[in-house]
Image: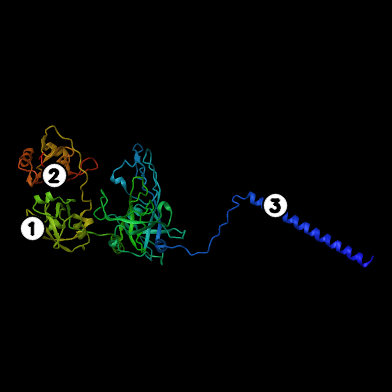
Amino acid sequence: MSFYEKMRKQKFLSLTVILFTLSIAVLIGALAQTSVRAAKETAAAPDATPLTIPNSTPTENEFTRVAKELEPSVVNISVDYIPKAAPQSKATPRRRQQPQQTPNDDDDQGGLPDLFQRFFGQGGGGGGQFQFGEPEDQRSESLGSGVVVDRNGYILTNNHVVEKATTIKVKFLNDATEYPATVIGTDKDTDLAVIHVDRKGLAAARIGNSDVMQPGDWSVAIGSPFGFQATVTAGIISAISRDIPGDSNASFQHFIQTDAAINPGNSGGPLANIKGEVIGINTMIASRSGGYQGIGFAMPINTAVKVYNQIIKAGHMTRGSIGITFEPEQNPALLKVYGADHGIFVRTVVSNGPAEKAGMKPEDILMSINGKPVSKGQDLIDTVADSPLGSTLKIGIMRDKKPMTLEIVVADRTKLFANGPGGEAPEESGAEPNTSQMKFGMSVQDLRAVDRQNMGYKGSAGVLVASIEPGSFADDIGLQKGDVIVELNREKINNREDIRRIQSTLKPGQAVAFQVMRQAQGPRGGGEWSPFFAAGTVPANNQ
């Protein structure tokens, strides 16, 4: 074979290889294009661009900073309560333990006491039904919150969280361990308690000054609502020095109101300002459903600090008293009848108490303390309660329209009122047929010896209020059926004619004051009799 033929054959072979290679490449490209086209046709969003997560710094604000600072100081409190069963007859029905939180879904039902609720979790117990048979131990478990105020393990919370506890356990943030806690002391008057866990080096919250808070300031609540630990909610201060209607401890409980979301389980946790300082201990809510409705209440930290400092020193809270009860509302007409233009009307004086020993009497008008005028009962309570036991106060009074000064030694309130100051709701009494209609919208009847015996009333003077007309003057000033009127404008009342005689001398616009004896509601229908004072201005129609 010649050289020329060899070259031609080699060129043909190379061309064949090139053509084969190109064919394979075209085939592969076509298959790839077909695959891509098929993939695009089957994608859920073929024209969407995949998202990417950028590298960025965390977004922080003042609330974030408050939460980070305060959360390590907020604890979850779990409480076990096993009531001690008392022996009962099998034939005697008994009511199961009520849950601590009883929602009411009907906004039109329930009164003020039901509206304002202290709470700390999902209470145990039944639904209020009766059962027969031997009692059983009914264990209940509840959750609350607290705040560490001392790095050595001292925690502030609510009294109602721990007062019935058989065991108390505390959990800290990011720590699954449950630490046993003991109660150092409690104060029912402010619903505060101090508990302790055996741990050192804890993160203690910073304490603020609740007196400088104003409506509109930011507020942050942290706690364990419904058991969800370290829950942070924010709002504003809605009001300060808020009193709760019908609260038996209202003399010592003046709350910060907030709209930061507070729910069952938050109780005992801190309310903080925007600086991260604790300015309150969350205590209760106003709710018709049992849950958050924008109105929560916290005990001011300034009050809590006073209680805490006394508890860690003495194990309990001590408050001063001079041993009197008084009219809770200032009544200008009542004061005018007794010759004063301001002050507190003394209702009763505790037997052998400091005030009685100093010469104070019922119906005195307490007008000043250490030279400072007193215009309402809270002024008296705040000054006397904070005075050291054994200290002497100069009390200015008005008696029979003459000013006097008494020196009264402050005593322990809990000892003076060991059984409570009384003043419960009056007992309803049926009226006898021997009644007379009087002015002011009331009817009265004379009291016979048998009436006094049946009523348990030992007074020698007075007439019984048989009925009160709704909306009348008597109703407006607080007189009630079952009261015994003993004085009218400081004149003794022995019978119905005494009332008629005095009423005939009164003119429209003139101040009029009644002193009555009122019976407290006892366990069997009759309780102790105590004085009550009602006063007002004679209406234009004098009826």
Picture quarter with the C terminus: top left
Q: Earlier in the sequence, mark 2 or mark 1?
A: 1
Q: Position of residue 42 (x, y in %)?
A: 64, 49
- Between residue 389 and residue 110, name the one nearer to us: 110
Label 1 sits on what residue type? Pro
**How packed is label 2: few (under 14 Cα within 10 Å), some, or many (20 or more)?**
many
Q: Earlier in the sequence, mark 3 or mark 1?
A: 3
| Closer mark to the observer between disc 2 and disc 1 | 1
Q: Position of residue 97 (x, y in %)?
A: 36, 44
Q: Position of residue 523 (x, y in %)?
A: 24, 42
* Badge number at residue 34: 3
Where residue 385 sits, quadrant-wise, is: bottom left
Label 2 sits on what residue type? Val
The residue pinned by badge 1 equals 403
Q: Point out the residue furthest to the right here.
A: 1
The residue pinned by badge 2 equals 516
Element under label 2? strand
Instruction: Please give the count of numbered marks on the rendered protein.
Output: 3
Element under label 1? strand
